[in-house]
Image (cartoon, rainbow, N blue to C red):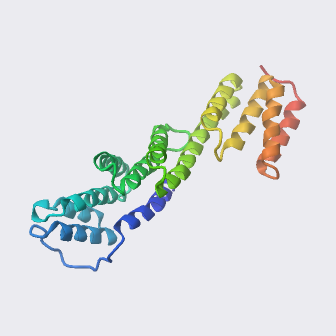
Amino acid sequence: MLRRGWIAVALCGLLAVLAGGCGKKKKDIDTRLLAPRDTYRLAREEIQRGNLRRALEVLERIDYRLGEDRALLEPLARITTADATFYQNNDIALIDARALYLDFVTLYADHVLAPYALYQAGICSLSQVNAPSKDQTETYQAIQDLRSVESRFPGSKYAVAARLMRRVAEARLVEHELAVGRYYLKKEAYPSAIERFQKALGQFPDTTKTGDMFLAIGEAMMRSGDTEQGRFYLDRVITDYPETPLETQARKTLKKLTAQPAKN
């Protein structure tokens, strides 16, 4: 479900890149003698029909010796190759697509599509993210790519999209740390739980999971005997998240742990 979500978001980028001309279905054409511009057009039409593998085959046949517009067409062919690879929607394709997008940024850093390519590299990593309980290497990679979009192309519309996607990725990392910390909490390993919660809160202090983090760290501190700090975090939940399930849970936790002695 997660991957399909990123694919849907990124589809807007592909439509923007490939806009212009609707591909009518045609018989297979021998591309060996076509001008590069016409071969590229055929590849674009194949993508619009959903024939991604066929589009990649056509793109590989572009012979720039048959035309004089290589400087214009080659960047477009490269980004279209990356897009067609990306939309095959499997782990290997996503890895390959990310490399193609990053190659584009390296070769054409000043191109109008460079922000899009770097953004898509981040989406490739984000599309491979595992469940919160699993390894989060790809999540960290996605955050790095998306931050690069914001820093290198701050005026681009993709910087705004990258910021939104980065926050989603950061929330996923916090969710991972919450899962690990709650495991320690269940085992009554309170110092280890607090360490995981504090690490995540320090790295990502403002995510959609911040309230959950305050609740978890407050409970862990209360159970460890640090009542004052525990109350501080639980009170933050009550104050910052009124009339929500988080507030209800914070009040229940306070009532329960105030009435029983803490465990060390």
* Rendered image quadrant of residue 262: top right
Q: In the rendered view, tell whether residue 219 sits above or below residue 243.
A: above
Instruction: Report the side of 55 relative to 119 (left or right).
Output: left
Instruction: Report the side of 99 relative to 227 (left or right).
Output: left
Q: In the rendered view, tell whether residue 34 sits above or below residue 79.
A: below
**Position of residue 32 measured from the top left corner of the image (x, y, whole percent):** 10, 67
The quadrant in which the C terminus is found is: top right
* Rendered image quadrant of residue 174: top right
* Rendered image quadrant of residue 212: top right
Q: Residue at x 78, y 50 (%)?
A: 245
Instruction: Report the side of 163 relative to 13 (left or right).
Output: right
Pick the residue in front: 175 or 76. Answer: 76
Toward the top, the furthest residue is 264
Residue 249 visible to an observer of this rendering:
no
Q: Residue at x 10, y 65 (%)?
A: 66
Residue 206 visible to an observer of this rendering:
yes
Q: Residue at x 33, y 54 (%)?
A: 111
Instruction: Report the side of 239 relative to 63 (left or right).
Output: right
**Position of residue 141 measured from the top left corner of the image (x, y, whole percent):** 45, 40
Q: In the rendered view, tell whether residue 21 sits above or below residue 67.
A: below
